[in-house]
Image: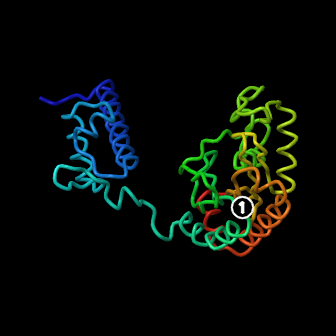
Amino acid sequence: MATVTTSEGSAERREADSGALARGLNILSRLHEAARPLSLQDIAESVGLPTTTCHRLLQSLDVAGYVYREGSLYCPTPRAACPLPLEHPLNRLRRDTAPLMRELQERHGPSVLLIAFLGDHRVTVECVAGNYSVTPYFDTTVTAPLHASVSGKILLSDRTDEQRDALLGQAPYSARTEWTIRDRAALYAELEEVRKRGWATNQNENVIGICAVGSRLAAPSGRALGAIVLTGPSRFFAKGFDTMRDDLLQACQMLNSTSHAIRTMTQLLGV
């Protein structure tokens, strides 16, 4: 007898496939976050799944080449841990920028970040830690508020008012400190200045005692691709701000005009 596939049955299978994909990606995220091999029980508890379900998903990830077993422990494979090819535009940008970042850090002291814009998302591609007592922590995904961070202001400066409204939501914006800009008109006026001059600041606006200045990396079209940012304790910025800003502008202008990685990033992002 012929089997008739109903639309309801197809929808259920698609939903099941989507759920399995989400759970598999969650398992990979936990393995990356742990930065050590994990047992089946550890993984199941961390993702909130029965061990039987987790074991089945791990088997699928093993077959697909994303995890491997070391005895009773599971680890991400190179395919999962380092998915980007060495010649990927982000890796090329990291290599092109690294010498300039080390020079900026050695000269000025604060940490130096290379941040790329992937659509409206911000990713830390590279960092050079600063010379101060508290070891800074920077995550791959930048989560600092758009209106209270250098990278966020540079990204927003590249968007229309309508796009900014969609990203920021309704004013007044959330206050991280007493210096956070919460008024729409005041913020948008600053963003227009950022767009014209190519650099942005954060004066204790996200964390009290932490300041930052950054300059825009741009495609030949002028579209912002990312930023190089100096960030650290405010004492570094009390007297050295102007020199930091000028050095950042010079570094970014050189990269914008000479780095082939900037061209490949332009192709990657379609801008």
Q: Quadrant of the C terminus?
A: bottom right
Q: Position of residue 132 (x, y in %)?
A: 64, 57
Q: Is residue 151 above or below residue 82?
A: above
Q: Is residue 223 above or below residue 101?
A: above
Q: Nearer the viewer, residue 133 or 27?
A: 133
Q: Quadrant of residue 190?
A: top right
Taking the spot 27% from the left edge, 39% from the top edge, the residue there is 42
**Residue type of the residue flagged with mark 1:** Leu
From the image, tell me which residue sits under label 1. 217
The colour mode here is: rainbow
Q: Quadrant of residue 20?
A: top left
Q: Nearer the viewer, residue 30 or 189?
A: 30
Q: Quadrant of residue 263?
A: bottom right
Q: Position of residue 119 (x, y in %)?
A: 62, 48
Q: Residue furthest top?
A: 8
Q: Is residue 41 above or below residue 90?
A: above
Judged left or right of residue 170, residue 127 is left
Q: Residue furthest front?
A: 133
Say few, some or many: other residues with alpha carbon within 10 Å of mark 1 (under 14 / 14 to 19 / 20 or more). Answer: many
Q: Position of residue 240 (x, y in %)?
A: 82, 61
Judged left or right of residue 213, residue 67 is left
Taking the spot 82% from the left edge, 54% from the top edge, the residue there is 238
